[in-house]
Amino acid sequence: MSVRKLKNLRGQIDRIDRRLLDLLNERSKVALQVGKIKREARKDVYAPVREKELLDGLVRRNRGPFPNHAVRAVFREVVSASRALQSPLKASYFGPEGSFTNLAALKYFGRSTDLVPEPSISKVFGAVEQDRADFGVVPIENSTEGIVGPTLDQFIDSTLNILGEITLPVAHHLLSREGSLKGIRRIYSHPQAIAQCRNWLEQNVPGIPAIEAENTARAAEKAAEDAGSAAIAGEYAGEVYGLKVVKRHIEDNPNNMTRFWVIGKKFPPKSGNDKTSILFSVKDEVGILYRMLEPFWKNRINLTKIESRPLKKKAWEYIFFLDMDGHYDEKRVKDAIQGLDRRCLFLKLLGSYPKANH
């Protein structure tokens, strides 16, 4: 009886899958028509606000049991494939294949986007500025290590804008070819990853040296080349380089997150749930910190981050990086930024963009 019931249930799944396939092709035909209209109207194929609204709407509509995170993952790939039918997109990202930035780009754009690795953050900016890529993905902040200075430094002179953001949990796994600690004589990883797993390493593999690599993806590549090696890296790096998981989640802090920016030449419209980022510098005067924050208090703007960074061109002067809730096209946000601008030596709007889904 159970065998017959199982066969019937599998038959139902097969019929549902065929219906899904027919619907996906029907959707693709409509997407092709949308692409044609966009080309005739000279509109961009990629519309981040529209895509965010679509995914958010599907999650709100979902009644389960299919989980919300899977709804986003499945439909992100549907949207990515449909977008590629209209016009192929290319996005550059910092780091080799298998890096966390590669994973961020993949989760943001989907697998139907041509993702191209670049060896440095400046190269990512250059690829987008020189039209070798439509978009770029760069890290901006880690919850334990702080701001990524080279990304902010690039924005001082760049004409690019922030179009979106994505946050990823930094899950470090111990990976090897065999998936076992037996025979492991060395462990490779980036210095930050080694530091973030220090307690686990000391307690579980005290006699095995941890050797620094350029990044976690390169560490995974080294482990793939040598059966006597393991790597501390993300699961995606293990997939890319054919490694097995020896031990999952060996990071000391389970709440470690990294935030990434998507950069490009456009300025997204309001989505209704936006963030605005700016850079500015001020004279070194008594009370200047109070005066530069006053316009935001007056306009009831919630500041989510403020960070100072030394100016490389002049000793003992600083540039400030600030995140706030809201979009520049909102009057209160614009009034606050313009109020700050009157007190600054330099101010640059980096972008207003949809907030990441956590």
Image: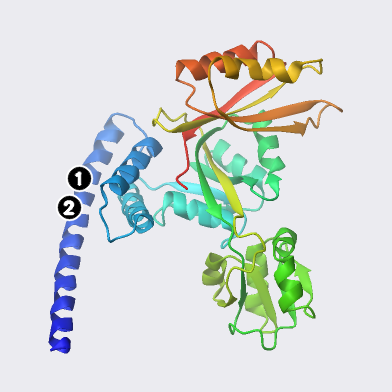
Image location (x, y in percent) of residue 116: 53, 53
- Type of amino acid at the residue the image marks with label 1: Val
In depth, the one of 136 and 346 nearer the eye is 346
Q: Residue 299: tell me if it is visible.
A: yes
Identify the residue position indicated by label 1 in the image. 30
In this view, 206 is above or below 130: below
Left or right: 234 with respect to 26? right
Mark 2, secondary structure of its residue: helix
- Type of amino acid at the residue the image marks with label 2: Glu
Image location (x, y in percent) of residue 70: 36, 58
In depth, the one of 76 and 196 nearer the eye is 196
Identify the residue position indicated by label 2 in the image. 26
**Image disc number at residue 230:** none
User: Is the residue under label 1 in contact with that under label 2 (CB below 8 Å)?
Assistant: yes
Q: Residue at x 80, y 32 (%)?
A: 312
Q: Residue 290 lies in what quarter of the image?
A: top right
Mark 1, secondary structure of its residue: helix
Left or right: 288 with respect to 179? right
Q: Residue 282 lies in what quarter of the image?
A: top right
Q: Residue 133: tell me if it is visible.
A: no
Q: Quadrant of the N terminus?
A: bottom left
In this view, 77 is above or below 49: below
Image location (x, y in percent) of residue 133: 51, 44
Image location (x, y in percent) of residue 323: 59, 31
